[in-house]
Image (cartoon, rainbow, N blue to C red):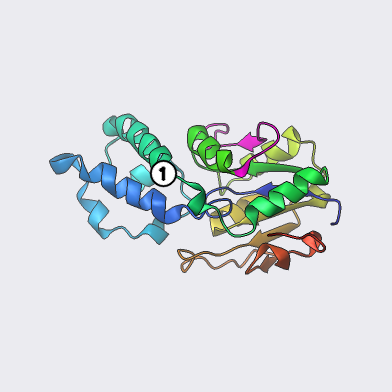
Amino acid sequence: MNRCHVIFDIDGVIVDSEQLHFDVLLDVLGELGERAPAKISDIQPQQLIGLSLAETLDEVGLPPSMQQEVTEKIIARYQEKLSAHYLRPGITGLIAALQQNGINFGFVSTAPRDVCLANLSLLGLHAPPALISGDDVERTKPFPDPYLAMLKLKEMDVQQTLVIEDTDLGIAAAKQAGIPWVYAWPHALSVAEQYGQASRIIARLTDIPQFSGINIV
């Protein structure tokens, strides 16, 4: 394994959770009855990929006065439904290898911190995760702020850092932060993503050259 620093997106990279997020959103909004925004029936899950929860609720037309209540319900429902079933192939093996080899890594997401921690709890980390969530920066993706914050937090040499992302918004954020190697890892809901700024589109984690020689189960 090449000595490098690794930053992971979470939703769509650590966990294949985009459809779960959408299903939970529909469930919670559906329980609002007549108060539910009419626009939700026209929204497709791929339209919301990469958006923060606050941006998602704005996108579906939920009034600001209702967003705190709905946010709390969405987070609680998501945590109830989440399981190891949603982990993407090879991710636990890669994380284990990074820990075993002393590789510096962290996680960046637009999601609320509670959601991020629920996702990361599935990994069996040896220590509390280095995490920049949507709650930790004023401007999240596609702005570079979350990635710049992680580079600072973990004292990463930007020229020795790689990122794994699943969205154009996340890739744009990483590239604006000056990170040279940004790999796009598509999933079932990535059909609307272009990945024009990605260093490479991968089908599996072993396609990343810096991970050559790792046995990722």
Q: Name the chief secondary structure element in magenta.
A: loop
Please state, as top left, top right, bottom left or bottom right, where the C terminus lies in the image: bottom right
Residue range in magenta is 123-138
Residue at point 20%, 41% (across, down): 31
Q: Is residue 131 above or below residue 172?
A: above
Nearest to the observer: residue 192 or residue 6: 6
Q: Position of residue 8 (x, y in %)?
A: 65, 49
Q: Position of residue 145 (x, y in %)?
A: 63, 40
Q: Position of residue 52 (x, y in %)?
A: 46, 44
Q: Position of residue 140 (x, y in %)?
A: 55, 41
Amino acid residing under circle 1 = Glu
Q: Is residue 193 left or right of residue 199?
A: left
Nearest to the observer: residue 163 or residue 148: 163
Q: Is residue 60 visible?
A: no
Instruction: Looking at this view, name the residue that lies furthest to the left.
Output: 34
Q: Is residue 132 left or right of residue 118?
A: right
Q: Is residue 42 above or below residue 126?
A: below
Please state, as top left, top right, bottom left or bottom right, where the N terminus lies in the image: bottom right
Local packing at callout 1 (Cα closer than 10 Å; few below 14, some 14-19, many 20+) is few
Q: Is residue 179 magenta?
A: no
Residue at point 27%, 30% (across, down): 65
Report the residue marked by disc 1.
55
| Corner quadrant of residue 214 | bottom right
Residue at point 40%, 36% (across, down): 75
Q: Is residue 2 left or right of residue 128?
A: right
